[in-house]
Image: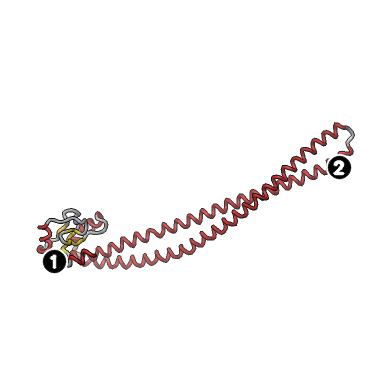
């Protein structure tokens, strides 16, 4: 019976659609995993950059503090020698040196003040970078586990569906299965459709009235002249129309 053969194919089609939907659903999870991992990596790089700037700031502060200390010692030493100098020329030369050293000190002090202000801002930046990273880490940890659990369950379901598919294929007419495979690949996974009130439910176009008649009376397996899917007459037009 042609109707029985198509019913067997339709059962196969139901399982094939579930397999297709499950595969599509499964594909979204690794993408999500890659996304949250990349967000985590970005947070990590941002924090590394903040810590680098903080270390630069600390290094610059130490350098300026050392410079300031050396120059202050110089100034002290020179100031104590000013009174021992014999000639105005010597005095003027040392006074000039002192002036330069004092300016250097002033510059170093200003730089230290600036660095201290920057340090506070950088400390805040690094602290917020740390909490941002911790948050992204916990997302990866939590969602990563969830995603793995979903993928495991998808794998289990897929195994069941594949076993069911193998059982259904064994019950199908072999000569129709390869045609079914070809049509469903070309037609979005749907190869067997009902005709309701003269309309193919695959492409929503009317089939010729004579063909609609043949569907009811002949035992031949027919395909829609427009979309080439296998067609059969809906037994309950109302139910099929609502399906
Ligand atoms: Zn059609």
Across and down, in percent, residue 202 comes to 21, 58
Asked if residue 69 lies left or right of residue 156, the reply is right
Across and down, in percent, residue 91 comes to 85, 34
Quarter containing the C terminus: bottom left
Q: Earlier in the sequence, mark 2 or mark 1?
A: 1
Quarter of the image holding residue 32? bottom left
Asked if residue 111 lies left or right of residue 102, the reply is left
Across and down, in percent, residue 177 comes to 21, 61
Residue 212 in view (yes/no): yes
Picture layout, residue 203 above or below residue 11: above
The residue at the point 21 percent across, 65 percent down is 240
Give the CA separation, mark 2 to mark 1.
120 Å
The residue tagged with tag 2: helix, strand or loop? Answer: helix
The residue tagged with tag 1: helix, strand or loop? Answer: loop
Q: Nearer the viewer, residue 74 or 128?
A: 128
Asked if residue 187 lies left or right of residue 211, the reply is right
Q: Nearer the viewer, residue 126 or 7?
A: 126
Q: Which residue is mark 2?
A: 80
Residue 4 in view (yes/no): no
Task: Report the mark closest to the observer, 2 or 1.
Answer: 2
Q: Residue furthest top?
A: 89
Across and down, in percent, residue 174 comes to 19, 62
How many circles with numbers are drawn on the protein? 2
Q: Dot 2, crowdedness within 10 Å: few (<14), some or many (≥20)?
A: few
Asked if residue 99 lies left or right of residue 146, the reply is right
Quarter containing the N terminus: bottom left
Q: Which residue is mark 1?
A: 1
Callouts 2 and 1 close, C-beta under 8 Å: no
The residue at the point 21 percent across, 59 percent down is 201
Q: Nearer the viewer, residue 151 or 36?
A: 36
């Amino acid at each position: 019976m042609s109707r029985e053969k198509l019913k067997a194919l339709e059962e196969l089609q139901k399982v094939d659609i579930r397999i297709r939907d499950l595969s599509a659903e499964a594909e979204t999870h690794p993408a999500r995993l890659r996304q949250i991992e990349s967000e985590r990596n970005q947070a990590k790089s941002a924090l590394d950059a903040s810590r680098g700037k903080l270390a630069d700031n600390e290094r610059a502060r130490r350098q300026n503090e050392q410079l300031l200390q050396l120059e202050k010692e110089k100034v002290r030493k020179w100031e104590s020698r000013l009174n021992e100098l014999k000639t105005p020329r010597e005095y003027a030369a040392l006074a000039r040196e002192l002036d330069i050293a004092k300016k250097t000190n002033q510059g170093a002090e200003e730089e230290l003040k600036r660095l201290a202000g920057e340090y506070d801002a950088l400390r805040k930046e690094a602290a917020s970078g740390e909490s941002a990273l911790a948050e992204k880490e916990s997302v990866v940890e939590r969602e990563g586990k969830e995603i793995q659990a979903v993928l495991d369950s998808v794998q289990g379901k897929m195994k069941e569906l594949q076993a069911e598919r193998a059982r259904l294929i064994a019950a199908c007419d072999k000569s129709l299965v390869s045609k079914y495979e070809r049509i469903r690949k070309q037609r979005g996974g749907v190869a067997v459709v009902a005709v309701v009130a003269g309309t193919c439910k695959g492409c929503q176009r009317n089939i010729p009235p004579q063909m609609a008649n043949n569907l009811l009376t002949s035992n031949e397996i027919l395909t829609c002249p427009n979309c080439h899917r296998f067609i059969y007459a809906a037994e309950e037009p109302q139910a099929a129309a609502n399906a």
